[in-house]
Image: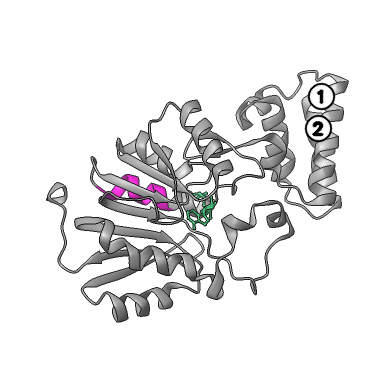
Amino acid sequence: MIIRELLQLGYEKTQEFNKEPTAAKLLLSGLLEMSYSDIFINYDKEITDEKAEDYLELLDFHVLENVPIQYLIGSTNFYGRRFTVDERVLIPRPETEYLVDKVVKKLPNDLKVLEIGTGSGCIGVTLNLEKKYEVDATDICEDALAVAESNMKMNEANINLIKSDLYENITEKYDLIISNPPYVSETDEVAESVYFEPEIALYSDYYGTLHISVIILGATKHLNQDGMIILEHGYKHGLFIKRLVSNFLPEYRVFTLKDLQGKDRYSVIRKRGSVWKKDK
Ligand SMILES: C[S@@+](CC[C@H](N)C(=O)[O-])C[C@H]1O[C@@H](n2cnc3c(N)ncnc32)[C@H](O)[C@@H]1O
């Protein structure tokens, strides 16, 4: 069988089970370790029966049991780099990549950064490599930290990984505290594929606001003069964060930013009138 025929079978299978057709291509690209353009260039290349069987078997796990393709191939792409992912960590989302892109393009270099809840390490590793930031990246979960460590090594980054429940083991101060914390509410409906991801990475009490609140209220002790907090959060949390900050940290301001779907997804929190010397 040639690659084109196998991919065609994959497309037919995804169509039959109402799945995104891109899943067929993503799985093939991961299994053959080829980029999409390599697949296209090698359309007429023969593929062994064994590989073809592996492919169709794995695709069944996706279409029949909703296992995310990224877990089936054991990796994902984030900001142009490969990151290992498995059931120990959340699969990095495009929303997070978009946030990282804003930081890369808009913030100055040479910041000292705390990332809370690093999971696969995608945020901390990318900011260390793209901006040369000195990054302390935490997670409450040792399994997640092991994945982050292997991603740090694979991508030749250098970040400090710290096991910590939020600020529990954090003693230093930072220019930037960034986090994509758990923010799903137990009352939210989630896609079936999300059931494969770790609950600890997803859910937060009080309608998804507990982690966000502790991160914001605890940040003042850990921010340098003119420091900034950047959070990814649920699209319903923007107003909650504005109220929290105006009630408890009135000297701070909140800028709510939208994701690519136009939903409130990120908050930037900073003391009024702050400017980094590096901004000037
Ligand atoms: C939504 S995931 C984000 C993972 C990764 N930063 C990303 O953006 O893809 C949240 C992460 O926070 C971690 N976490 C959950 N509760 C925590 C806590 N109390 N303190 C530190 N990390 C926590 C989870 O283990 C998980 O890795």
Badge 2: residue crowd in 10 Å (few <14, some 14–19, many ≥20) = many
| Majority secondary structure of magenta residues | helix
Query: Which image quadrant is residue 245 in?
Result: bottom left
Residue closest to the eye, 46 or 220: 220
Kindly identify the amino acid type of the residue bearing the numbered disc 2: Tyr
Figure colour scheme: one colour
Q: Is residue 120 visible?
A: yes
Residue closest to the eye, 91 or 103: 91
Where residue 276 sits in the image (x, y, percent)? Answer: 16, 53
Name the residue tied to disc 2: 55
Residue closest to the eye, 206 or 264: 206
Kindly identify the amino acid type of the residue bearing the numbered disc 1: Lys
Q: Is residue 263 visible?
A: no
Indicate yes or no whether the magenta region holds residue 45.
no
Q: Is residue 237 left or right of residue 196?
A: left
| Tag 2 secondary structure | helix
Tag on residue 51? 1
Marks 2 and 1: CB-CB under 8 Å?
Answer: yes
| Tag 1 secondary structure | helix
Residue closest to the eye, 221 or 128: 221
The N terminus - image quarter: top right
Q: CA distance from mark 2 to mark 1?
A: 6 Å
Tell me which segment is drawn in magenta.
Answer: 99-107
**Ligand 1 has an atom within 8 Å of the beta carbon of the residue at disc 1:** no
**Ligand 1 has an atom within 8 Å of the beta carbon of the residue at disc 2:** no
Q: Is residue 70 left or right of residue 144?
A: right
Badge 1: residue crowd in 10 Å (few <14, some 14–19, many ≥20) = some
Query: Which image quadrant is residue 73 in?
Result: top right
Q: Is residue 10 left or right of residue 264?
A: right
Q: Residue at x 55, y 75 (%)?
A: 207
Q: Is residue 122 above or below residue 246?
A: above
Where residue 59 sits in the image (x, y, percent)? Answer: 80, 40
